[in-house]
Image (tube, helix red, strand yellow):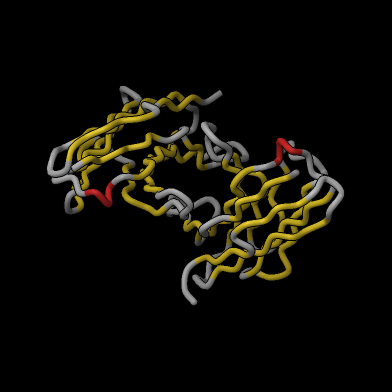
Amino acid sequence: ETGVTQTPRHLVMGMTNKKSLKCEQHLGHNAMYWYKQSAKKPLELMFVYSLEERVENNSVPSRFSPECPNSSHLFLHLHTLQPEDSALYLCASSQDRNAADEQYFGPGTRLTVT
Amino acid sequence: GQNIDQPTEMTATEGAIVQINCTYQTSGFNGLFWYQQHAGEAPTFLSYNVLDGLEEKGRFSSFLSRSKGYSYLLLKELQMKDSASYLCAVKRDTGFQKLVFGTGTRLLVSP
């Protein structure tokens, strides 16, 4: 496999469920990102990991919990979500967080919270 | 704060030329990216400008004016497969989110 992969591609979950999104990058990059893409809104950065350490945590609700076990894998653990959390969740990676290099995106997980 | 504006939607015909504009106001500007995103797919890199001027890459060109806070993406010889959303993204050297995106321009190419 090449590039950035994400599983599952589609997920429907109830508000009381617990699920996890997975991202894997095969590019040898050192930084990985989770973005949320909602209709008619800009991509919103949720979490950044650089060299497996979370750089900062934005004002994201605690019902979203990231995990980065190594430089190639990134997870987003979900629990007790709300309907407004329904969106496309995109994973991305780049060589370095601070360099002016492009970010490579995965195809996303389309999440629907019922 | 930061603000990035681009038109919500544009239409054009096959074989034509279309220009998608992006204006921005941001601190710590360090370059501007254009990405293409087909429905249900990942955004893919198209171009990067950090200096003023025009960058040409095949049918696509991107222009930047730092003093005016303005960029455009020019698509020539439009093809049906160019129907997609085009995202303008500003690279910043400060702040948590170093790549700040606009809402995207949805381009529809008709026969």
Left/right placement of residue B4 relative to residue A72 reads left
Q: Looking at the image, which residue is at 27% across and 38% down?
A: B73
Between A3 and B2, the residue placed more toward the observer is: A3
Q: Determine the image quadrant of residue A69.
A: bottom right
Q: Looking at the image, which residue is at 23% across and 40% down?
A: B110
In the image, residue B26 above or below residue B95: above
Left/right placement of residue B84 relative to residue A59 reads left
In the image, residue A77 above or below residue B89: below
Q: Looking at the image, which residue is at 24% across and 49% down?
A: B80
* Number of marks present in the image shown: 0
Q: Determine the image quadrant of residue A82.
A: top right
Q: Determine the image quadrant of residue A59.
A: top right
Image position, residue B40 (x, y; %): 48, 52
Image position, residue B41 (x, y; %): 46, 54
Image position, residue B33 (x, y; %): 38, 43
Between B17 and A94, the residue placed more toward the observer is: B17
Between A105 and B89, the residue placed more toward the observer is: A105
**Which quarter of the figure is the N terminus of chain B placed in?**
top right
Q: Residue furthest bottom?
A: A1
In the image, residue B34 above or below residue B1: below
Left/right placement of residue B100 relative to residue B17 reads right
**Which quarter of the figure is the C terminus of chain B placed in?**
top left
Image position, residue B6 (x, y; %): 38, 28
